[in-house]
Image (cartoon, rainbow, N blue to C red):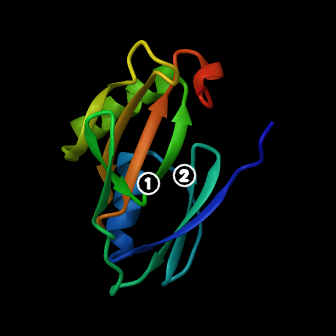
Amino acid sequence: MPRPFHLAFPVHDLAAARAFYGGVLGCPEGRSSDAWIDFDLFGHQIVAHLSPQARPAGITNPVDGHAVPVPHFGVVLEMADWQSLADRVEAAGVAFGIAPHVRFFGQAGEQATMFFCDPSGNALEFKAFGDDSQIFAT
């Protein structure tokens, strides 16, 4: 079984990050200080670091007819968990940058995907595969 990854990223407001990652996404909170917060993102350790000067890159790359934000991060979920998260994000009124849909339909790597940003503009992608053998399909 793969080990959890660790990702540290900038946020403009720790209270907003706590409300978004803890409240909207349902990530349990770990350790914190007045400058950072650890979250459990589906078993992975992400750390929101206070950085008022940080700004999103604003770069996109075309993928299957959509402008995908770069950089972005997220998790490959089970399909039921992906749908539950999509419903929770929508119910919270978070705007989707790329609405939940199936990408590469009928092709290698077919996947459900969605993109949205946290309150600091960090882009997140969550995806799921009907068949996990397609995760690295070419």
- Compared to residue 70, the image places residue 87 above or below, namely above
Determine the residue positioned at 33% across, 87% down: 53
Do labels 1 and 2 touch, CB within 8 Å? yes
Q: Amino acid at mark 1?
A: Gly
The outermost residue toward the right is: 1
Q: Which residue is mark 1?
A: 22
Determine the residue positioned at 45% across, 45% down: 26
The outermost residue toward the front is: 138
Q: Look at the numbered disc 1 and give the secondary structure of its residue.
A: helix
Question: Which one is in front, 78 or 98?
Answer: 98
- Compared to residue 53, the image places residue 72 above or below, namely above
Q: Where does residue 96 sit, x and y in percent of width and height? A: 23, 43
Q: Amino acid at mark 2?
A: Pro
Determine the residue positioned at 64% across, 45% down: 43
Q: Which residue is mark 2?
A: 28
Q: Where does residue 82 sit, x and y in percent of width and height? A: 44, 29
